[in-house]
Image (cartoon, rainbow, N blue to C red):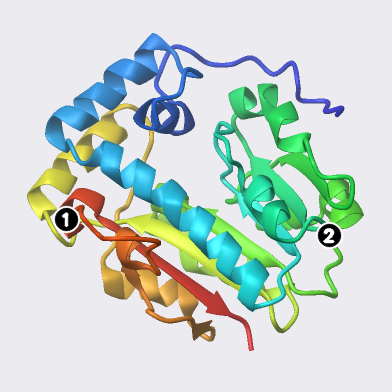
Amino acid sequence: MTNSHAAREIDTSRPHSARMYDYYLGGKDHFEVDKQAAETVAGAYPGIFVCARENRAFMHRATRVLAQEHGIRQWLDIGTGIPTEPNLHQVAQSVVPEARVVYADNDPLVLKYAERLMRSTAQGRTTYIEADVNDPAALLDAPALAEVLDMNRPVALSLNALMHFVTDAQDPYGIVERLLAVLPSGSALALSHCTPDFDPATWQKVTDIYNSAGTPVQFRSQKDVARFFSGLDLLEPGISVGHRWRPDGEVTDTDAEVSLWTGVGIKP
């Protein structure tokens, strides 16, 4: 893999959401500043570790459902984060070896570890592009995207725990609409989004922690998360708390611990 941005300096002076998420998942690709910020969040909201785990589990289940039941063979995963196995392409290619996946993120640390995202099956293909969801035009125009994905065939747009980092001032609904507009009928949106619905006071504390660390966030209600799926055909069970979206086994965590709205919709 070659990338002209590979040498871009990693800022370790302040915490980064992707590296904090790595800490929540028990990873090792973060710095002390990220650990401290993540532990501050955990002090206010101990369920953050459950939330992160259930977010990954939802991604796995949604990917399998789209591959097995809806014929999806291509994914565009934005806000990829630091690779944590199994990655989306590994889940997809375990079902359909020919699956193609484009990962996109704007954190140079993710770029550093992106070779983990490139270990595709022989039949499939994966690539990584450095791009920002706040500039969907540049993301969609990236040459690597056109090289891997056939935009005339259905694509699953995967936005996991990303859009709460896009505030209303940045036009989150317009961004998702722009991304979906270029995808053909039969494409899908798989989205997860943290919510204050079950414990507003705690999530206000979490909001304050992220904002003070220089990472603006906007956690949304179920109604506001549902807006991202406007015009799509929602799969059952609709907009659900993460661990209740087609669970593999018994549900044991509480909704407040998970505090994550999830959904999958198909473009007519």
Residue drawn 20% across and 30% down?
A: 42
Q: Which label sits in the foreground, 2 or 1? A: 1
**Circle 2 Cα neighbour tier, 10 Å, few/some/many (<14 / 14–19 / ≥20):** many
Q: Answer left or right for 42 relative to 82.
A: left
The x and y percentages for residue 141 are 81, 55
Q: Is residue 150 above or below residue 128?
A: below
Earlier-in-chain disc, 2 versus 1: 2
Which residue: 42% across, 81% down? Answer: 236
Q: Position of residue 53 (x, y in %)?
A: 37, 43
Quick one: SS at disc 2? Answer: loop
Furthest-bottom residue in this view: 268
Residue type highlighted by circle 1: Thr
- Residue under circle 1? 254
Q: Residues within 10 Å of mark 1 (few under 14, many from 20)?
A: few
Please give the residue where the numbered disc 2 appears in the rendered image. 149
Quadrant in the picture for the C terminus: bottom right
